[in-house]
Each structure stands twice: as structure tokens, then as C-alpha cells.
């Protein structure tokens, strides 16, 4: 199962996207915009 990180400063957008992705079978994590993220590129 694929994991997806949803990051947006609008909590409603995060909620909507995460629910759509979860319905499609993805494992979703939500991070607030101000979170300190260290992503590998």
C-alpha cells in the first residue's frame, strides 16, 4: 500500500484530499504547513 503525505495550509483541503485518497486505498498522513519537514528528493 502506498503512503502519501498531504501538506497544505488549509485544513479543509487536507481533510478533503486525505479522505479521497483513503477511499482509494492509500495510507495518508497529514502535516500542517508549519511542520518542520525533512524530505528526501
Image: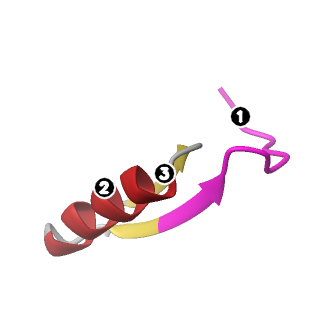
Name which quarter of the figure residue 33 lies in: top right
Compared to residue 22, the image places residue 18 above or below, namely above
Q: Position of residue 17 (x, y in %)?
A: 30, 55
Nearer the observer, 22 or 34: 34
Residue holding disc 1: 40
For the C terminus, the image quarter is top right
Q: Residue at x 14, y 67 (%)?
A: 24
- Crowding around mark 2 (Cα neighbors within 10 Å: few <14, some 14 to 19, many 20+) is some
The local secondary structure at tag 1 comes to loop
Q: Sequence-wise, which precedes: disc 1 or disc 3?
A: 3
Q: Which mark is residue 17?
A: 2
Compared to residue 36, the image places residue 31 above or below, namely below
What is the span of residues highlighted in magenta in the rendered image?
Answer: 29-41
Residue 32 forms part of the magenta stretch = yes
Q: Mark 2–mark 1 contact, CB under 8 Å? A: no
- Crowding around mark 3 (Cα neighbors within 10 Å: few <14, some 14 to 19, many 20+) is some
Q: Position of residue 22 (x, y in %)?
A: 26, 72
Q: Mark 3–mark 2 contact, CB under 8 Å? A: yes
7 left or right, relative to 28: right
Rounded to the nearest whole Å, what is the CA distance between mark 1 and mark 3?
Answer: 15 Å
Q: Sequence-wise, which precedes: disc 2 or disc 1?
A: 2
Nearer the observer, 37 or 33: 33
5 left or right, relative to 38: left
Residue holding disc 3: 6
Which is the main secondary structure of the residues drawn in magenta? loop
Q: Residue at x 55, y 46 (%)?
A: 7
Amino acid at each position: 500500500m502506498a503512503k502519501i503525505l498531504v501538506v497544505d495550509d488549509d485544513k479543509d483541503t487536507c481533510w478533503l484530499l486525505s479522505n479521497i485518497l483513503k477511499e482509494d486505498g492509500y495510507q495518508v498522513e497529514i502535516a500542517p504547513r508549519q511542520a518542520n519537514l525533512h524530505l528526501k528528493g
